[in-house]
Image: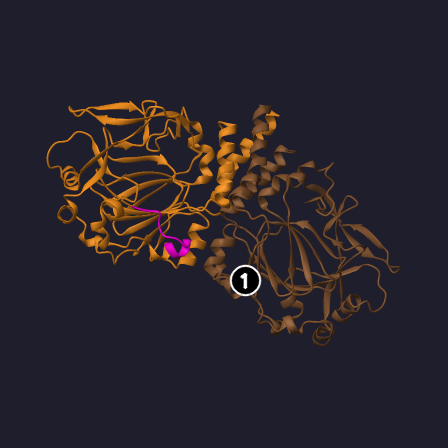
Chain colours: A orange, B brown
Amino acid sequence: MGDRLDTVRKCLRQFPEEARELYLNEAVPYLSSPPSPLAFYRDWIGPNKPCIIRNAFNHWPALSRWNPSYLREAVGSKEISVAVTPHGYADAVYGHRFVMPEERRMPFASVLDIVEHKGERTGVFYVQKQCSNLTEELPELTGDLETDIPWMSEALGKQPDAVNFWLGESTAVTSLHKDHYENLYCVISGEKQFILIPPSDRPFIPYELYQPATFCQREDGTFDVVDEPNTEKVPWIPVDPLNPDLQRYPNYSLARPLSCTVKAGEMLYLPALWFHHVRQSHGCIAVNFWYDMEFDIKYNYFQLVESLSKVVGPL
Amino acid sequence: MGDRLDTVRKCLRQFPEEARELYLNEAVPYLSSPPSPLAFYRDWIGPNKPCIIRNAFNHWPALSRWNPSYLREAVGSKEISVAVTPHGYADAVYGHRFVMPEERRMPFASVLDIVEHKGERTGVFYVQKQCSNLTEELPELTGDLETDIPWMSEALGKQPDAVNFWLGESTAVTSLHKDHYENLYCVISGEKQFILIPPSDRPFIPYELYQPATFCQREDGTFDVVDEPNTEKVPWIPVDPLNPDLQRYPNYSLARPLSCTVKAGEMLYLPALWFHHVRQSHGCIAVNFWYDMEFDIKYNYFQLVESLSKVVGPL
C-alpha cells in the first residue's frame, strides 16, 4: 500500500513538471498592445497563464495626473480605509498567528503625508482595501480612468466585481496567497514586484492553520496582536518566498516561482488561483480589476490537486 | 499508509461528483443557432462541455442533396476506404484482443449497394476513415458544404486538422474511446446516438491491455482475426456502455453517461477527451470536423487524473 502512496506522490511531483513542459512560460511574457477579447481568452485566460500588457491604458488621464499634489487636491479630505501594521505585513503569518492589519479610517491627505515623509508615524500604512475601494471610497477619481477593462469585460462577458486602489510605502508587503479572481493589475506610478507561482505547484506549497488576530496600535505607537474572538483557525501559507525556510518546508524547494516587475503604464494579467507575493516602490500607485473567476473545469481540477496535496503530505 | 491511500481514492471519487455539482449539465443542452466565436470559446470549449447546435449548417447544399442517388451520381465510381467487420465493432475489444477493421478499398457505389440492401454481403461496412477522407477521398463533395466551421476556426484560431465523412449501416458501432480533438459532428441525414462520459469520470473508466489485431475476411465471408506482428499491447476500454459488465468493472457503475441523439441538420460539439460511444440509423450520413486540442492546463490536469486512476486501482 505504501508503494502506491509513493507513486501517488510521484504523480503529484511530475504534474507541475509536465505543466512547465506543456504550456507554462519560463518568464512572464509581454504583449505590446491589448489583445482582442477572443485572443485574450484563448491565449491567456483559458490556459491560465500570466502576461504583462503594454500600452493598455495609455489613454487614462490618471497616468499623467496621479501624483501626491493632484490626489491631495482631488481627494485629500476624503476619509479612506488604511491598513496599518508594525512591519508592513498585512494578512500574513506572524508569531504563530494569522494577523490582519488594523483598518484605520483616515483622511487621504494623511496617507499622502506619510508617503511624502511629512511628520513622524510609527507603523506601515497601505491603502489596499479590496472592496472596490476606488469606486466606493474614491469616486472622484473615476473620471481619470475606466472602471472596467473593456476587452476583458467582453472576453469574460461580465463587469469587474471590484476595482481597487493601492497606494503604500515600500515596506508594505502582500504575503503569498491566491485569489478566486481573474486579476488585471495596472501600475499608474512607480512599480510593483510580483513573485508568481502557478496553481500546478500547489503540491509544493505548505499550508498551516493559524489563530486569526488583528494588529492594534497603542497610543505610544507600539502594536498589540489581538486574537479575533470566537473564530476558527484559518489555513495560510507559512512560507516567505523571499526567505523560505526550506528545512521546515523542503517541498517548497520544488516550486518554481516567476518574478516580474510591473512598471508604470504596464498591466499584469494575474490569473485566478496563481499564488502571488507583492512588493512595490515607495508611493507606488496602482489600480486593479477583479473579475469573478469561473468555478468550472479548471477549478474542479485544482480542488482535486488541493485535496490530494493535503492528503499525501511531504513529497 | 493504507488510510491515506483510501483518502486518495475518496478524492478521486469526489472529484467527478464535484464536476457535476460545479459545471456539468445533466443532459446535453441545445443552442438554437451558432454562437459567436468568443461566446463558444467561453461557454463550451473553455469549460469542456458538450452541446448540440441547431441551424448551424442550414445553408449547406449537402443537407438537401446528399442521398444515395445523388452520391451514386457524384462519386459512385470513386474508390474509398471502408471498414469491414463481422459484427459492426471496429477498433474494439473482441475475444481478448483489440481488433481493428479490415480496411477495404471499394467503389463508393458498392457501399451504397450495401446500404440500400442491393445484393448479398456478409459483414458490416462503415465509411469511417478518419484521415480527412472527405477532402482527401471525396473532394467532389466539398462543394456541397464548407470545409471548416468558420466560427469554430475563428474561436480556435486554426483550421480543422481533418474533415471526415461517415456513412454506414445501423449495425456499425464505434466503441467507447476518447480523442485528442475538439470535435464538431454534423449529421446530414438520419441520426446518430451518442453516449458521452466526461473526462472527470476517468477514475471510473477501466482500461486493459490488449494484443492488437485486424479482421480479415475470407472468400467464404467469414472473418479471421490476425494479430498485428511486432506490436506492443495497447490500452483500451473493455466496457460496453450498452451492456457494462459491472461485476468485473464495478467502478463503471459510478460513471454518469449522458445520452443524446443528433438528428439531421444538428451539430454536436464533442469536447476533447470526452469518452464517446456512437451508433446510428441505417445509412446515416455525417461529416465531422476535428480541430487539434490544446495540450495546456486542462490536458495537464487530465494526465494527472489518468496517472492517479492507474495507480490507485478500484475505487
- Magenta stretch contains residue A158: yes
The residue sitting at the right extreme is B220
Image coordinates for residue B130, horizontal then vertical, percent: 66, 59
The amino acid marked with disc number 1 is Ser
Instruction: Residue B164: give x, y in percent of width and height.
Output: 64, 63
Find residue A172 and report its horizontal and vertical position in percent: 25, 35
**Mark 1 — residue?**
B32
Q: Residues within 10 Å of mark 1 (few under 14, many from 20)?
A: few
The residue under the point 64% across, 46% down is B257
Start-end of magenta stretch: A153-163
User: Which subunit holds the residue at mark 1?
Assistant: B
Judged left or right of residue A69, residue B237 is right
B81 or B177: which is nearer to us? B177
Left or right of residue B314: residue B77: right
Q: Quadrant of residue B173?
A: bottom right
- Residue at position x 52%, y 50% from top? B295
Q: How many marks?
A: 1
Asked if residue A238 is among those painted magenta in the image, a careful observer would answer no
Whether residue A153 appears in this view of the structure is yes
Outermost residue to the bottom? B73
Q: Residue at x 38, y 40 (%)?
A: A179
Instruction: Check the picture and name the quadrant holding the N terminus of chain A.
Output: top right
Which quadrant of the view contains residue B244? top right
Task: Confirm whether residue A17 shows in the render.
Answer: no
Query: Does dot 1 land on a helix, a strand or a loop?
Result: loop
Q: Would you place residue A18 above or below residue B189 in this image?
A: above
Q: Residue A219, percent across and down?
A: 16, 24
Q: Given the current orientation, which residue lies at the most extreme left position?
A: A119
